[in-house]
Amino acid sequence: MLAMLVILALAGEIVPVKLIYIEPDVGVGGNVSERQYAYMVQIQSFMVVDYVHHCGGTLLTASCILTAAHCAGHSLKLRAQAGTVWSNSETEGQRRPIVRMVAHERYIQDGVTRPYDIALALVEHPFVVDGVNVVIVPLLPEYLKPPETMDVLGFGKIDHDDTLPDRLQIVECRFHSPSDCQRHPTEGTLCVGRPGATACQGDSGGPVVATIDGVDWLVGVISFGLKKSCGAGPIICTDVLAYSDWIKQGVLNFTNTQ
C-alpha cells in the first residue's frame, strides 16, 4: 500500500476529507511538469488586500477562458493567470484582469451547483500565446471518441486541512456510469473519477482533457462532486461537446465586442 493523497478540489462548500491509502496502480497523479498543460488558467479573486485562488479555467483563445458558471459572481473582482504551473505566482506567467464573465443563460446563480454549469470569461488584453508557455486547447469534436482515461487538472485542496498546493496537480480518471454521480443524471454532464483519485473543493471550472495521438482535447469542465466522495469518488463535469454551439457563439460574441 502506498500512503498518498491524490485529490483535486471543487469551489463551494467545504467537505472534510480523510487521508486515504492508495494502491500504486489505482491512484495516478501528482505535480505537473513545467510547461505541461499550458492552456490551464488560474482564476483569482481579490480578497481584502490581494488575489487568492478562486477557480480553474481553460484558455480557448488568447482572450477567452472557459470555466464553470458557479465561478462567476457579479460582485467579485477577478483576474486570470496563465503560463505557469505555480499557484498565484508573482514572478512567472501572465496576469490579466477579467472584464466580463457570461454564464449560461439557463444557469441559476443561487449558491447551489446545478445543470448548465458553464461560463466564458473575457480578459482585458489577450494573453501572449507563444505555443510553449501559453497555448490554447481545442474542444473535442464529435467525430473523435474519447480514450478510456483522461486528465483532471487543478490547484484545489490536497488534504483534510484545506491545504492548497503550490503547484498544478493532475489526476488520471476514467468515465463512470452517470448513475455513479447522480441519482437522476442530467443531460450535458459527464461522470468521471478513479478510486482514490478525484476532485474536491477548489478546482471548479478546471479542464478535463483527453490526449489522442499526442494532441490534447478539452472534454469537460469540472463542476461538482458528492460530499461523501470528496477526494475519493467520481465527480460531475460539464460535457463541452453538449455545449459546443453555445461555447462557439459566446467566443464569437466576445471577439466582436473587442
Image: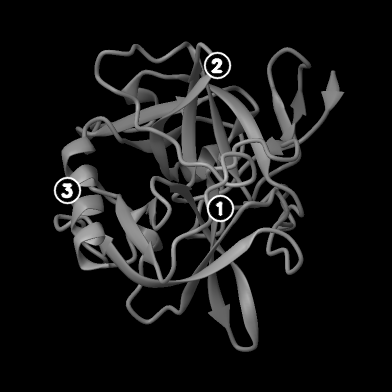
Residue 247: assigned label: none
Label 2: which secondary element: loop
**Residue that numbered label 2 is attached to:** 214
Of mark 3 and mark 2, the one earlier in the sequence is: 2
Q: How is the image coloured?
A: one colour
In the image, residue 1 lies at what x, y percent? 84, 18
Q: Taking 139 as reference, is 156 above or below it?
A: below
For label 3, the SS is: helix
Report the disc number at residue 249. 3
Up-down relation of residue 252 to residue 95 (above or below): above
Q: Tell me the kind of residue under disc 2.
A: Gly
Q: Is residue 150 left or right of residue 116?
A: right
Q: Please name the amino acid that badge 1 sits on.
A: Gln
Q: How many residues crowd around disc 3 within 10 Å: few (fewer than 14), some, or many (20 or more)? A: few
Q: Does 237 sit left or right of 227 as displayed?
A: left
Badge count: 3
Residue 190 image offset from top left, x and y in percent: 34, 29
